Image (cartoon, rainbow, N blue to C red):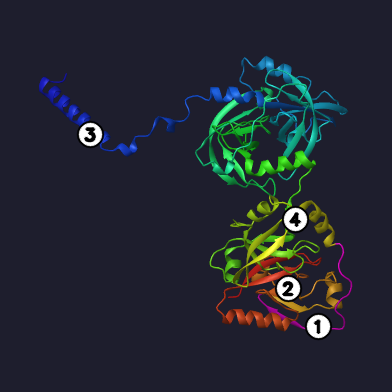
Amino acid sequence: MISTPLLRAMRKASLAATTALMIGATAAPSFVTPAFAQGPESVANLAEGLLGAVVNISTSQTVKGGEGENAVPMPQLPEGSPFQDFFDDFFKDREGQNNGGSQKVQSLGSGFVVDAEQGIVVTNNHVIADADEIEVNFSDGSKLKAELVGTDTKTDIAVLKIDPKAKKLTAVKFGDSNKMRIGDWVMAIGNPFGLGGTVTVGIISARNRDINSGPYDDFIQTDAAINRGNSGGPLFNMEGEVIGINTAIISPSGGSIGIGFSIPAEIATGVVQQLTEFGETRRGWLGVRIQPVTDDIAESLGMTTAKGALVAGIIKGGPVDNGVIQPGDVVIKFDGKDVVEMRDLPRVVAESPVGKAVDVVIVRKGVEQTVKVTLGRLEDGEKLAEGEAAKPDEGADKGAEVATASMLGMTIGELNDDTRAKFGIAADVSGVVVTAVAKDSAAAERGIVAGEVITEIAQESVSTPKEVMDRITALKEQGRKNALLMLASKTGELRFVTIRMD
């Protein structure tokens, strides 16, 4: 039992604490946040206006033995779930009914209408890949057959066409994904597990994600729930614009754990436009092989910071085969856009029109300069690059006396008929051949192997072992810690490595 004087004292202390708390709260208005920062009160009106443009994509494919690769698996439901009968009916006869013969399997995905007049629908390539039939299902229950207009495996985008006269269509438009910031609210609509018309809300969790799915990875990461069947569906901003195409998830369980990835509209818009117009992509092409600029490479080139894309080789017959860009150049800006990492360059080049003349800022032998380049077409360049190594030039060094030297854990020798024959080196490769590499040496650490050819050291050509030794000595005298070597493989493919000289 508490005495009356003690109770009074406690009440006074409580009142004082309450007063202090109120004063403290009043004195700190910076902690007060507006109501809208807690998230939208409702997205019902927004969702209602968009559901008609989002479609379910169903495909059928004849396969031999087992399930199709894209078939949606039966989800694991809790015992007694009210959805059990629905899923049993939906997935029945999908598994193990073929007894080793041909089987008709189905896969499910999502998509959205971007042009109501032409009947253009966008989805993921992996949703419709190898499909025999494609059907578009609308939120009102109607269905239309779709034909494939074009696909792009590099970005996993496909464009379909349905008959716009068969049904009044509702379309949505792409927004500016570059304006989206981490923390912005987004809404996904799709067809998870065949349920159709499912709306989820979340935020943008991260930007510029590279998940190693293709050469132009620049995904938007979101925690809006995305599951199997959501692929190809839209990710909307709060204005109802498509700022991403939902494509992939990270999930040990197969269900959403709040890590989903969407192709940004910045990339998707151009691809969709080209597929719609041409039935194929027509990307810009620079005609170079590139590799990352590491700290060691930056130091060896006299650069203060590691940035850009290092040109490791030039494709013969390509746009810069005229010498305007050379192996060893570092591209730091392309058409006014900064190239911070190696992966930035392929993306900005691919987004540029074929035939466009652009300014490219490079660092060559420590000096920054701007060159003008007219872009070719990537699709043509890929065919050229594939056949380049298979057609070496005729002729070879003849009659040269073999001379050898040892440095940095390598034994090197002159490149002549004997060494070409011994290591199978193509006739158009020139430089100094590596004949042996010491175990646990600096050269071995960098993956250098016998039969590779040193063509340049610190961006200076070398043709004899003596020139190699002289270049290494000169670099040491300059206080350099690493030497930048350009190596050619037996077939002539180039790469750069740095090697410690201490």
Q: Amino acid at mark 3?
A: Ile
Q: Are marks 1 and 3 in contact (CB under 8 Å)?
A: no
Tag shown at residue 454: 2
Q: Which residue is mark 1?
A: 402
Q: Which residues are magenta?
A: 390-408
Identify which residue, 383 or 258, lies in the foreground.
383
Identify which residue, 221 or 63, lies in the foreground.
221
Q: Which residue is most to the front?
A: 117
Which is nearer the N-term, disc 1 or disc 2?
Answer: 1
Tag shown at residue 23: 3
Q: Amino acid at mark 1?
A: Val
Specify the quadrant of the image occupied by residue 12. top left
Which is nearer the N-term, disc 1 or disc 3?
Answer: 3
Quadrant (top left/top right/bottom left/bottom right) for the C terminus: bottom right
Q: CA distance from mark 2 to mark 4?
A: 35 Å
Q: CA distance from mark 1 to mark 3?
A: 89 Å
Secondary structure of the residue carrying tag 2 is: strand
Which is nearer the N-term, disc 1 or disc 4?
Answer: 4
Q: Amino acid at mark 4?
A: Gly
Identify which residue, 361 or 256, lies in the foreground.
361
Q: Nearer the viewer's eye, disc 1 or disc 2?
A: 2
Secondary structure of the residue carrying tag 3 is: helix
